[in-house]
Image (spheres, rainbow, N blue to C red):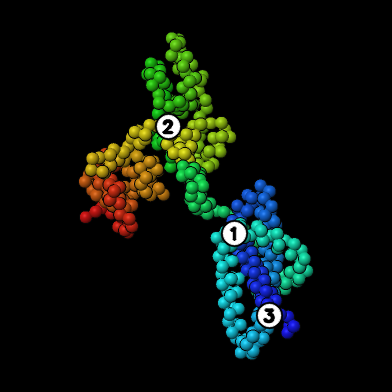
Amino acid sequence: MDHIPIGALFGALFFLILLSAFFSGSETGLMSLNRYRLKHLAKKRHRGAMRASQLLKRPDRLIGLILLGNNFVNILASSIATVLALRLWGESGIAIAAGLLTLVILIFAEVTPKTLAVLHPERFAFPATLVLEPLLRLLYPLVWLVNVVSNSLLRLLGVSPDARHSEALSCDELRMVVSEAGAMIPQSHQEMLTNILDLEKVTVDDIMVPRKEISGIDLDADWEEILNQLSHSEHTRLPVYRGDIDNIVGIIHIRNTLDLWRRKEANKEDLIARLREPYFIPEGTPLTTQLLNFRRKKRRIGLVVDEYGDIQGLVTLEDILEEIVGEFTTDPGDRIREVHPQPDGTYLVDGSANIRDLNRIMHWDLPTDGPKTFSGLIIEHLESIPEPGTSLMLAGYPVEIVQTKGNKVKTARIDPTFRRQTPSAEDGEPAP
């Protein structure tokens, strides 16, 4: 190269450093692309995304091509730098050239382009495919040979190069994606999406109306009492039974009983003729399954039964929908009747209050993997029926028993403003 001008060698060296930066940035940019956004753009026929998606189908070939090009230009740049050093400083300049070239390549051909590619992968990767795609066709035989040798070495090490890492997201990963969407998805929509993902963990037992709180029509009652109950019912559908809820006869829709109030000769038989067969739900059914069952069977209300067929509670389609979108059937001032705010910031909570309702509406964090009611949660922690005045730390919340009745807690006071951030191992034990 003695006959080549020094200016030409410097120009070639500068061009090779640019090529090295291109290959380094292309590798990082293509590997940093969001795979799901890439698929979305490819479906919208974005040309850059389609080319990048095609190249990433065989990442071993893409990496082989990029590293082949990057190593070639780096070695060639090193050779030119050595020639320049010999011509400018003699043999003592070789070490100087090696140090300078290492620093230049590290800064301008590695760190800088890779950092830019990580920050703006699409801006770097999509234009790069215009060069990499035809270059892969041109150098395919050489790339294929490199891949054959490298894949053979991987097999010797017990690694299968054909194995592909699954890109499917688990529920927890999808929940993280939704929570990190930020302003791209409104907060209310994020909450609904995460609530849908949580439906699989919730069963009908968690949201059902307990057996003792089911409102229904008792056919053993007087006809006038039945008509009065129908006219003043807060619900559109009611279970109808004889004497006891276990003797269920059917489900009545209030709108189907409007004519009974006008007809003087109407009786219980007319009411029974308008009943629909009851729909039973096995306890422990996940909400996702029950939502699909309601849709398939065209039902909006079901009775939860245990393994012996005894009725445990009642679940409606609205109850499941409220788990997704939040409360929408009651007034804000009457969202949870079992909670009574006090002037000092504490709350008097009825023992029959549902734990999930308390957490969702009051934004508390009581455990939901055990008893369903506040009373049951207290009794489980204490392992006994507490006396009024007993205090305990329940999941970090100070709780005081105000009133008990029989074998359950009727009312308890809770102070959510004084919650201990890290509950101790003694939580649930009576406070000294």
Front residue of 97/418: it is 97
- Is residue 300 visible to us here? yes
Kindly identify the amino acid type of the residue bearing the numbered disc 1: Pro
The residue mark sitting in front, 1 or 2, is 1
Outermost residue, top side: 264
Q: Is residue 111 above or below residue 334?
A: below
The residue mark sitting in front, 3 or 2, is 3
Counting residues from the N terminus, which is met first, the one under dot 3 or under dot 2?
3
Q: Spatial distance from mark 3 to mark 2, Cα to Cα?
A: 83 Å
Q: How many marks?
A: 3
Front residue of 98/322: it is 98
> In the figure, residue 354 lies in which quadrant?
top left
Crowding around mark 3 (Cα neighbors within 10 Å: few <14, some 14 to 19, many 20+) is some
From the image, tell me which residue sits under label 3.
6
Residue at the (32%, 37%) spot, across then down:
338
**What label sits on residue 329 in the rendered view?**
2
- Circles 1 and 2: CB distance less than 8 Å? no
Crowding around mark 2 (Cα neighbors within 10 Å: few <14, some 14 to 19, many 20+) is few
Circle 2 SS class: loop
x and y percentages locating residue 221 in the rendered image: 38, 20
Kindly identify the amino acid type of the residue bearing the numbered disc 2: Thr
x and y percentages locating residue 141 in the rendered image: 78, 69
Q: Is residue 37 left or right of residue 355?
A: right
From the image, tell me which residue sits under label 1.
121
Kindly identify the amino acid type of the residue bearing the numbered disc 3: Ile
